[in-house]
Image (spheres, rainbow, N blue to C red):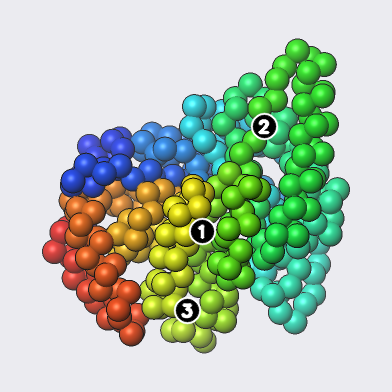
């Protein structure tokens, strides 16, 4: 894969046998955005809103957030931008908010924190909604959902924010489109609650970074156990396959936005499993598009058939790496 063909960059991703794969971008820093739009992506699959929060000295105001979100929605007019609500805690502490816990990754993070601080959540969702008026390309994504009760509570708050912003917009003769709402599938408990999602959300996005961490009970940032953290672990492979199969079965659009999507071996396996929407960092877009152009769905499916029977992550990695090398 050393020779990434530059003219491929602008084109959309199509496999050798003509199957379209949607490529989205993981973003958070505004510096990413202009490059990405020139690289022919289908939109932003994950906008990590905690980054603007991390750059400030205190919680950004509703107005400040509105302006930041509007800048990114503007850059991607006509393409979806999936904005994730604040996912702090765990590996993303805020400098102006001390949370001391023995197990931060199992603690007060993501939706757990914002549901305990509905005022922070409401300000953020209102800012997202205000930013989207007239551009209409904003989707909302909820992080770290572990059960339907958290989801319902979040949906009620989003509805409240929607009514408030829609009313204010109407007074100015403007219309607010209802946002599509999705959740991250990154806490393993959600694997067994997928059917409860169909009537509640518009899409799901698999967070393979945290899903791997929680399935294998291994801190994703602890170098001492880095050898245990492996997204190609057979249990993770089976979980990812189960999610895409089930979501198809129940008619729920699914994409994947963890690091695995931007890794050639990971992308091959994911497309072979049935994922047709991958979200990744800017630097991986050209490489993944190039690779997908040179392989067929059938070859990727065969690789997945092998992976689903493998006992060890290393077997999966060796086979998939040999496949990538022979095509690049
Ligand atoms: C993930 O968990 O896979 C993910 C995309 O979110 P983050 O890395 O921000 O936790
Ligand atoms: Mg995550």
- Can residue 281 be seen here? The reply is no
Front-most of residues 157 and 25: 157
- Which numbered disc covers residue 229? 3
Q: Could you tell me which residue is drawn at 26 percent across and 44 percent down?
A: 19
Front-most of residues 120 and 71: 120
Quick one: label 2 or label 3, which is nearer the N terminus?
A: 2
Return the residue at label 1: 206
Return the residue at label 2: 178
- CA gap between label 1 and label 2 equals 23 Å
Q: Could you tell me which residue is drawn at 77 percent across and 21 percent down?
A: 169
- CA gap between label 2 and label 3 equals 39 Å
- Can residue 304 be seen here? The reply is yes
Quadrant of the drawing holding the C terminus: bottom left
- Rendered location of residue 238, percent (x, y): 41, 72
Left of 64 or right of it: where is 82? left
Q: Could you tell me which residue is drawn at 74 percent across and 59 percent down?
A: 150
């Amino acid at each position: 894969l050393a020779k990434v063909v530059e003219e491929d960059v602008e084109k959309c991703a199509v496999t050798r046998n003509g199957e379209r794969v949607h490529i989205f971008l993981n973003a958070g820093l505004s510096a990413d955005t202009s490059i990405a739009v020139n690289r022919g992506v289908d939109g932003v699959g994950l906008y990590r809103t905690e980054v603007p929060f991390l750059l400030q000295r205190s919680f950004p105001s509703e107005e400040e957030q509105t302006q930041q979100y509007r800048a990114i929605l503007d850059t991607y007019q006509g393409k979806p931008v999936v904005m994730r609500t604040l996912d702090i805690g765990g590996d993303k502490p805020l400098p102006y908010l001390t949370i001391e816990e023995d197990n931060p990754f199992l603690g007060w993070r993501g939706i757990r924190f914002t549901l305990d601080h509905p005022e922070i959540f409401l300000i953020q969702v209102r800012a997202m909604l205000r930013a989207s008026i007239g551009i209409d390309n904003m989707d909302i994504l909820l992080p770290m959902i572990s059960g339907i009760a958290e989801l319902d509570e979040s949906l009620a708050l989003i509805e409240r924010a929607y009514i408030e912003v829609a009313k204010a917009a109407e007074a100015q003769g403007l219309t607010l489109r209802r946002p599509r709402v999705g959740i991250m599938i990154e806490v393993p408990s959600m694997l067994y609650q997928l059917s409860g999602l169909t009537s509640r959300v518009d899409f799901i996005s698999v967070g393979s970074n945290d899903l791997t961490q929680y399935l294998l009970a291994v801190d994703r940032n602890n170098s001492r156990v880095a050898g245990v953290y492996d997204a190609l672990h057979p249990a993770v492979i089976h979980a990812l396959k189960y999610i895409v199969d089930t979501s198809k079965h129940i008619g729920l659009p699914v994409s994947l936005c963890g690091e695995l999507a931007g890794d050639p071996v990971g992308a091959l396996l994911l497309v072979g499993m049935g994922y047709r929407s991958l979200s990744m960092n800017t630097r991986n877009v050209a490489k993944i598009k190039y690779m997908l152009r040179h392989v067929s769905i059938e070859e990727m499916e065969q690789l997945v058939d092998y992976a689903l029977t493998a006992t060890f992550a290393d077997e999966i990695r060796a086979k998939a790496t040999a496949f990538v090398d022979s095509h690049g």
